[in-house]
Image (cartoon, helix red, strand yellow):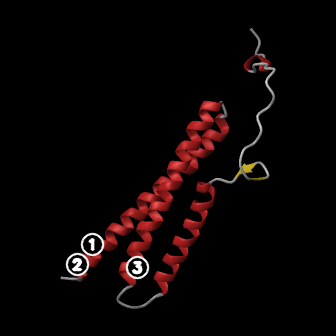
């Protein structure tokens, strides 16, 4: 039996659905797509600033920055999980694999940031003794 690519499509007399909400080209503008890049840039800028400050508040600032950066990467990982599941359900295997890969990398970076924040918190506890 030969493969027929047309067999996966269902013909319908329904009109095509209209796009809802604002778009930039084919990409829909959602709160997540606006918030996460802003949070990522902001937290990276804060960590860069905290790394250049040379006073007694440097370790707490770096610890807080690492914690917030970990939360941003965790949100990116969860967004990658959501996109992976949505693409897999829609039958877009290639895009699903790419979303899973980037989501997994974001998850690894998130837990690295959480470890960095935990080490900073331990250093603060030891320094206060």
**Residue 38: image x %, image y %?**
59, 66
Q: Residue furthest top?
A: 1
User: Tag 2's secondary structure?
Assistant: helix
Residue at 62 percent of width and 45 percent of height: 98
**C-beta proximity under 8 Å, tags 3 and 2:** no
Q: Residue furthest left?
A: 129
**C-beta proximity under 8 Å, tags 3 and 1:** no
User: Tag 1's secondary structure?
Assistant: helix
**Residue 89: image x %, image y %?**
60, 31
The C terminus appears in which quarter of the rendering? bottom left
Residue at 30 percent of width and 72 percent of height: 121
81 is higher (above) or lower (below) than 65: above
> What residue is shown with label 3?
61
How far apart in space, not on screen, are marks 1 and 2 (Cα)?
A: 6 Å
Q: Which mark is residue 24?
A: none
> What residue is shown with label 2?
126
Relative horizontal placement of residue 20, taking residue 75 as reference (left or right): right
> What residue is shown with label 1?
122
Of pointers 3 and 2, the one earlier in the residue sequence: 3
Few, some or many C-alpha atoms within 10 Å of disc 2 (few <14, some 14-19, many ≥20)? few
115 is higher (above) or lower (below) than 103: below
54 is higher (above) or lower (below) than 3: below
Near-viewer residue (33 or 95):
33
């Amino acid at each position: 039996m030969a493969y027929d690519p047309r067999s996966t499509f269902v013909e319908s007399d329904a009109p095509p659905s209209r796009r809802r909400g604002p778009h930039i080209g084919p990409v829909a503008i959602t709160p997540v797509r606006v918030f996460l890049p802003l949070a990522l840039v902001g937290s990276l800028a804060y960590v860069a600033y905290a790394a250049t400050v040379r006073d007694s508040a440097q370790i707490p600032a770096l610890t807080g920055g690492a914690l917030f950066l970990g939360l941003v990467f965790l949100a990116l990982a969860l967004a990658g999980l959501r996109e992976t599941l949505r693409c897999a359900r829609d039958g877009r295997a290639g895009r699903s694999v790419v979303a899973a890969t980037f989501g997994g990398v974001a998850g690894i970076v998130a837990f690295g940031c959480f470890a960095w924040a935990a080490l900073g918190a331990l250093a603060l506890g030891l320094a206060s003794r």
